[in-house]
Image (cartoon, rainbow, N blue to C red):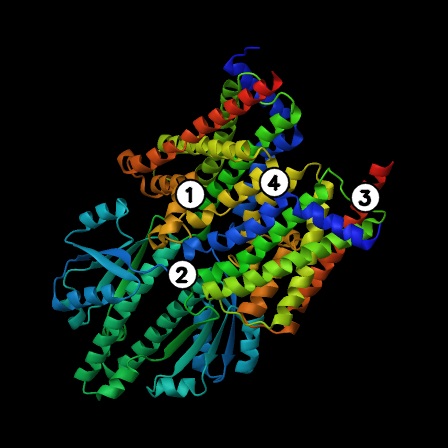
Amino acid sequence: MSLRQLLAGEIRSLFTDTTVMLTVFLGVFLYSFLYPLPYLKQLPREQQVVVVNLDGSQLSRQLERMVDATPQIHISERMHSLAGARERFLSRKTAGILVIPERFYRDLRLGLRPTLGFAGDASMLLVYGTVLEGMSTAAGTLAAQVAVQQLLLEGQPPRLARDQFRGAWLNLRTVFNPTMGYVSYVIPAVFVLILHQTLVIGAGLVSCAKRGTTVSSSPGMLVLVRCGLFMAIYMVLCLYYFGFCYDLYGIPRQAEMWMLAAIMLPFLAAASFLGMTLGLVLPRRELVTLVVLLSSMPLIFSSGFIWPESALPRPLVLLLQMIPAVPAIKALLGVNQLGAGYADIVPQLAQLWLCAGFYGALAWYLAGRRLSTRLS
Amino acid sequence: MKQSLARHTIEQWQALCRDPWLLSLVSWVPVLLFVTLWSVFSSNFARNLPVGVVDLDQSRLSRSLIRHYDASPTILLEQRFGDVARGTEAVRRGTVFGLIIIPKDFERDTVSGRSPTVSAMVTGQYLLVGRNVNSALSQAHATFTAGVETVRNLSTISPFPSQALAAAVPIATQVTPLFNSNTNYAQFLVSAMLPAMWQILMVATTIMVLADGRRRDPLCWPGDEPGKRFAGLVLALVPLFLLHGAWYLSWLYVIMGWPMHGSWPILILAQLLTVIGSIGIGALFFLFTLDAARALSIAAFYAASSLAFMGVTFPVTDMVLPARIWRSLVPICHYIEIQIAQVDYGAPLSYQAGQLLWLGGFCITLLFGSARLRRIGAARKEADA
């Protein structure tokens, strides 16, 4: 059988398989809208907070206004007792409570260090962190104002007082995702995983087809042609994800085109070989989809971008190194988001090529075995 | 041939035991997946996150500052860099999650009251890690400056330590994290991940079981009394899925001993409704495609993304309208609200009635499924006749 016939047969069996088409094209397209959907606003903003002001002084009301002015917090209600605030809280109408103690103003002026109370719902850690951030910003600003006033009272010149009330400053900057936005955090990694999972399903379904459309004399050729075909399709899908979608969601792209290609090439090869291996090992088509579907959640959470790899159980980390998506996510986040150089991702690239070689050889062997059993 | 409902149920269980794949799906696979997901966060907190430091001052005070930072359990200041360029490179390579740069003359400027600025950059790409490093650094820095300023104030403002401290830190704050008192990541995420995984398993298993029935007997599927047979299938699956659900709940809140303030009956009721809804939805996916692989692809689209829509990692109030519409169509998103409200707040039943009703609404899918199956059965009979 000539190469052209083989290729034509492969293309036919791929494009006539509705399930593969559904998963690969429609799936990849729809996922690109579904996954970013909940995070489109990037950051939780204006969380509802209840204030219990037991002081009532002018300064305490100023603090309330300062808290309300932060982008993180919106003061939804003012209560006169803790019991009322608690009630609000339990009915989940509010994300946090700010308590300004009695005699707040007096204690502050007397140098008695009054204590502000914050309580937040820590069962939702992101909301909790946001509320806390807003409250401490406001309290910190007020404390700074008070400290500067104190220095002014002691006769320091205003400029010096403003600059010097703090012993040493900390200029804390967030880099690479400066706003700590959720889309730019989740999407780069999840997109790699979506490409990986759909590719594995697609290649697996095609290889598992009982219909046996192509009978080739050489299993090596068959495996290579199939892999090439999937790589060609997925290169286009990669352009859509890392080009169009990145632009659409405003995700920074630091890597050069050739660097992305250097990652995608072994990644796509490894993933399609892995898919073929699965398809050849598993007895029925749907089992390929099942295995991939069930593996998705463990993969997302243990690929190292949500929870640091150092905190994961060691055996799990080792096991995961066999999945092409794991080194690919690491390499892609490195070059595209953190701006790492080629030299920094060499280990991941080597790992991807190794995966490709391993699964390629496995698929070749299995395809050969299947052909020989079919012939005999 | 007429059979009782119990007979159909027993037949379904027998079918489950015949196929090793199906048997795995309802026995050890859920256990393995739940344990794997839990093990990811089994360390509970992110500790010893590597952060680099460039000390351009090399003084007593700068070393004391480094010790202050290092004392935080969250970060590990192990890597020292000679210059900023090499430090930034490590940040780019991802070997450290942040870099602290202590300026030259840090000690001299601090002592002479010229308030030097320590710079720190933190990688925001890994959001959870970044937030942790951020807050650890600002906390450690605040304690450090409070100490420095108090010592300074002792000589200038007041010889009494308490007054010197008050001048340095005029307002104290007391932060109370409610419902998750040590801001434990495992408690926060795992309690949502397991239900999400549970739903994926339920939808997928339902599809596999239906497909198995059709594959075994392609000629006369769905057979006589398709409606009754479907009811038998549902009755066979409900206790199994409920067992999985109860298993992870009791593991987290009884064996692991995480706090649980709510009522078990409400939780189990919510689980029962979720199970019925998920079976119905899985059945619809299969019955309208009549192809297991295709149905599973749809199930993947529907269920695998549900964690993102649950509103645990990102608050529901900040989701755009289409996202809120989508999540209202996924049973587990309603279930998780009940679970959180029960476990954390112990909310009374009246607060939960709305969510429970929504969940109950998903039971309609069973009727659709049954109707669809009966229709397929009738069409088959006609074709046979």
- Real-space Cα distance between discs 2 and 4? 32 Å
**Residue position for label 1:** B258
Circle 2 packing at 10 Å, graded few (<14), some (14-19), many (20+), is: some
Tell me if I can see residue B137 in this picture: yes
Residue A164, image x, y percentages: 29, 83
Q: Residue at x 68, y 63 (%)?
A: A265
Residue B127, image x, y percentages: 46, 62
Badge number at residue A37: none
Q: Secondary structure at mark 1?
A: loop
- Real-space Cα distance between discs 1 and 4? 32 Å
Q: Amino acid at mark 1?
A: Trp
Q: Chain of mark 1?
A: B
Badge number at residue A42: 2
Depth-wise, is mark 1 or mark 4 nearer the camera?
Answer: 4
Q: Amino acid at mark 3?
A: Val
Q: Chain of mark 2?
A: A
Up-down relation of residue A110 to residue A202 (above or below) = below
Tell me if I can see residue B74 in this picture: no
- Real-space Cα distance between discs 1 and 2? 31 Å
Residue B91, image x, y percentages: 54, 72
Quadrant that contains the N terminus of chain B? top right
Badge number at residue A290: 4
In the displayed structure image, the side of residue A263 where residue B340 appears, left or right = left
- Real-space Cα distance between discs 3 and 1? 58 Å
Q: Amino acid at mark 2?
A: Gln
Labels 2 and 4: the sequence-earlier one: 2
